[in-house]
Image (cartoon, rainbow, N blue to C red):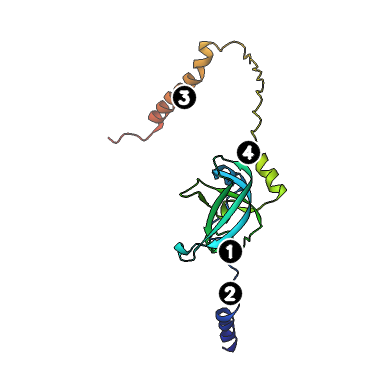
Amino acid sequence: MVLVLLALGLVAFGPAPTAFACDEPTLPFDRQVSRAEHIFTGTVTTSRIDPAQGGARRIYLVKIDKVHKGDGLEQSIRVASSTRTADCGLGKVASGDKVTFFVGAVKGNNYVEALSNEGTRAASSELDARIVAELSPKPAETDVEVKLTRVDDGQAPSVTRSIAPGLIIAMLGVVALVVGRLFGRPKPH
């Protein structure tokens, strides 16, 4: 009984399980690139909590250094994200950090939404290379020459040879009926 109580106490008051960084699944890289309307690398110049959202949103002012995908972005853009990593917020991004953003369409007054599970992460040369490789046109498949081989089966079988199996089966059926009739049960008188 004491062991049961100790086990229950450990479960109830033990360390909490580690939380996931985001409650949504992270998309595969090719889907992150294809779904994003804009992909750009920039330096975060300022970061502030949006008071209009009750502290649930953080607004980053980003100076764009390099645009990988999309056009029509201004040199400086506001990026909005949740303050909670469980809601796929960007986590700890500070002023001066270089970040590659995978975002959708520009909304409202020159701002975009960024989520951690959609590809936004710290910038790196390896990430740049992966983005360039994913966005580069894929080589067209070359046409493969197909050679057809004519199969010569010889001549078609004669009509009698084609009909013979069916006739043999029909004759066996008739013989079975006759034998069954002759040797079957006698008729009652």
Residue 186 spot, x, y in % from top left: 34, 34
Q: Residues within 10 Å of mark 2 (few under 14, many from 20)?
A: few
Alpha carbon of mark 3 to alpha carbon of mark 4: how far?
72 Å
Q: Nearer the viewer, residue 44 or 18?
A: 44
Q: Quadrant of the N terminus?
A: bottom right
CA distance for labels 1 and 4 = 30 Å
Q: In the image, which is nearer the foreground, mark 4 or mark 2?
A: 4
Residue indicated by mark 2: 16
| Element on which disc 3 rests | helix
Q: Nearer the viewer, mark 2 or mark 3?
A: 2
**What is the CA distance from the residue labelled 2 to the residue labelled 3?**
82 Å
Residue drawn at (57%, 42%), measured in percent from left and top?
A: 34
Q: Position of residue 70 (x, y in %)?
A: 56, 40
- 182 or 65, which is in the foreground? 65
Q: Residue furthest left?
A: 189
Q: Amino acid under label 4?
A: Leu
Tags 3 and 1 touching, CB below 8 Å: no
User: Toward the viewer: 22 or 177?
Assistant: 22
SS category of the residue bearing label 4: helix
SS state under label 1: loop
Tell me which label, 4 or 2, sits earlier in the chain: 2
Residue placed furthest toward the bottom: 2
Of the image marks 3 and 4, the number of the one nearer the N terminus: 4
Which residue is disc 3 drawn over?
Answer: 172
Q: Is residue 168 above or below residue 21?
A: above
In the picture of the structure, the residue carrying the numbered disc 1 is 20
Q: Residues within 10 Å of mark 1 (few under 14, many from 20)?
A: few
Which residue is identified by label 4?
135
User: Which label's residue is closer to the chain start, 2 or 3?
Assistant: 2
124 sits left or right of 5 in the view: right
